[in-house]
Image (spheres, grey):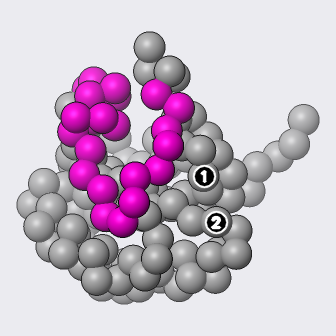
């Protein structure tokens, strides 16, 4: 049994956090330094309790086929977050989706992509 070096956002996000949207920032391991710097920039730029920046997850999990950084944010930050990520993402691909309660919908019809869509394992939602 291996011990992972990261936590899923759901394991440490406050219960009362306004979790309206997720941004999944995908990267390859050769882009790790860039995503580490981007995570710091997100934390510095968005100094608010309306955003939750998770640990960098260096492997595929759930429907996500690539390593990723997950950022959760409130609907009040939607426009600012999308605009900021669009200009700061470099070559990274980002999935932004609502938290409607229907994971399949959120990751398909509810999905917005910055960059190129990444293949997801949608069967985990069925």
| Residue hosting label 1 | 66
Q: Residue at x 22, y 70 (%)?
A: 81
Side (left or right) of 126 relative to 80: right
Crowd class of label 1 (few under 14; some 14 to 19; many from 20; radius 10 Å): many
Over which residues does the magenta segment extend?
101-122
Foreground residue among 59 and 112 = 112
Residue contact between numbered discs 2 and 1, judged by CB atoms under 8 Å: yes
| Residue hosting label 2 | 28
Q: How many marks?
A: 2
Q: Quadrant of the N terminus?
A: top right
Q: Quadrant of the C terminus?
A: top left
Foreground residue among 72 and 120 = 120
As drawn, 15 above or below 54 = above
Q: Residue at x 19, y 55 (%)?
A: 74
On the question of residue 73 being in view, the answer is yes
As drawn, 101 above or below 81 = above
Side (left or right) of 88 relative to 31: left
């Amino acid at each position: 049994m291996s011990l992972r070096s990261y936590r899923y956002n759901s394991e440490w996000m406050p219960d009362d956090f306004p979790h309206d949207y997720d941004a999944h920032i995908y990267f390859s391991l050769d882009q790790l330094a860039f995503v580490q710097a981007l995570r710091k920039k997100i934390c510095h730029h968005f100094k608010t309790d309306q955003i939750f920046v998770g640990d960098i997850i260096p492997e595929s999990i759930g429907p996500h086929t690539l390593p990723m950084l997950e950022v959760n944010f409130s609907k009040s930050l939607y426009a600012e977050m999308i605009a900021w990520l669009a200009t700061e993402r470099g070559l990274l691909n980002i999935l932004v989706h609502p938290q409607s309660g229907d994971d399949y919908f959120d990751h398909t019809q509810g999905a917005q992509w910055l960059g190129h869509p990444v293949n997801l394992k949608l069967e985990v939602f069925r």
